[in-house]
Image (spheres, rainbow, N blue to C red):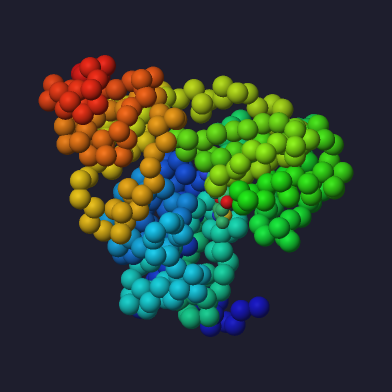
Amino acid sequence: MKSAEESNAATLGPQPGGYVYIIGAGPGDPELLTIKADRVLREADVILYDDLVCSELMARFTALKIFTGKRKDCHHFEQEAINEEILRHARAGKKVARLKGGDPFIFGRGGEEIEVLRQNGIGYEIIPGITAAHGASAYTEIPLTMRKISSSVAFCTGHPVSKIQVPDADTLVYYMVATTVHEVLDAVAQKGRDENTPVAIVQNATRYNQSVLIGTLGELRRGEKAVYSPALLIVGETISLCVEDNWFSKKKKVLIAGGDSSMYNTGEFIKVNFTCKGAVESEHERMENSEPLDLDYIDEIYFSSPLCVRNFQPFYAEIPARIIVTVADEATLAEYGKLFGGDAATIMH
Ligand SMILES: C[S@@+](CC[C@H](N)C(=O)[O-])C[C@H]1O[C@@H](n2cnc3c(N)ncnc32)[C@H](O)[C@@H]1O
């Protein structure tokens, strides 16, 4: 139970000592951010953002951006240091946005962060996000509940191994399974689930590189398949309703290297932005460039200028022949031909 003072601090609105918004960014597709979150992020002075928040989303906002996730070769904060950083900016009177992947209250440590704000009398609000389970469900066409097939769903964690639980729900969704998928499958089987129960592993849900592996509990237990983070494991009969050519897989994934890409604003395409700046100045820009895009999932690439072709080439020496290449003009076409030795590009009109 909170003291009256702590509760008041939480509900009074902006304090002289600043104000904090704990915000869910959704599972990856930048368009899955809520309108409210978008407004608050545009107004924020500082955004502290996590690992699973996509860089395309961050590029929309002008606030000071502080990356608090964990990535190779990059300084990252432990939870205590994140709490300190939030408090420091809030006490300086700033409007602080704490942006987390998915929903802050689903395996997101949002609860811990508001505890600290309450204890320190800092005002705050929480803006929910679409959790990975909902994103994966919608973008793979796997309903989490379905009349006559599944009337309950449980969100569980696969990490750490000691915390793996198997509740009595028709559909089970496991978060954080990248290193423990086999332990989770074993636990589910030991709980008595039939070996023929359908199971799905959804990696990078709602992102251009979403992949779905479907099998039965028995098959996946025997398989040696590596699972890459971020990934969810779904167990339950509704998986059998899923179709391989689901609506998201039918979209063309187009990599946009710079410039105006409004011609791709039709329902047919999923746009993936390549930051085509030469020099990288801030830590945020470094993060934007640190995640190489996987061309295996790309159907088309659009270059808006010769500079974008030049900045793209050090990252991707070759462009697979199946990818359609389009360019903005003759000069870009010439640069593309020079650097990639191809004449297969077409000029976009
Ligand atoms: C620390 S939890 C954060 C969950 C987040 N708060 C949410 O509501 O989705 C991180 C785990 O979420 C899952 N996850 C997050 N984004 C995902 C995505 N795009 N595709 C698949 N799984 C995802 C993965 O299981 C990942 O290991």
Q: Nearer the viewer, residue 128 or 232?
A: 232
**Image point 21% across, 26% down: which residue?**
336
**Quadrant of image for the C terminus:** top left
Percent coordinates x, y for residue 331 in the rendering: 12, 25
Q: Determine the residue positioned at 52% across, 35% down.
A: 210
The quadrant of the rendering that contains the N terminus is: bottom right
Q: Residue furthest left?
A: 331
Q: Is residue 110 left or right of residue 15?
A: right
Q: Is residue 83 above or below residue 72?
A: below
Does 137 sit above or below residue 100? above
The answer to whether residue 141 shows anywhere in this view is: yes
Image spot of residue 150 (x, y percent): 76, 37
Determine the residue positioned at 26% across, 16% down. Answer: 344
Question: Compared with residue 325, is residue 42 higher up or lower down, i.e. above or below?
Answer: below
Residue beneath the point at 73% across and 49% down: 184
The quadrant in which residue 262 appears is top left
- Return the x and y of residue 165 as percentages of the image width and height: 76, 55
Judge left or right: residue 244 versus residue 45.
right
Where 158 sits versus 201, above or below?
below
Direction from residue 65 to residue 343 in the image, left or right = left
Residue 108 vs residue 208, the one in the foreground: 208
Q: Quadrant of residue 222?
A: top right
Does residue 265 show up? no
Question: How many numbered markers are drawn?
Answer: 0
Most foreground residue, 212 or 339? 339
User: How far across and how far down the image is residue 25, in percent?
Assistant: 46, 51
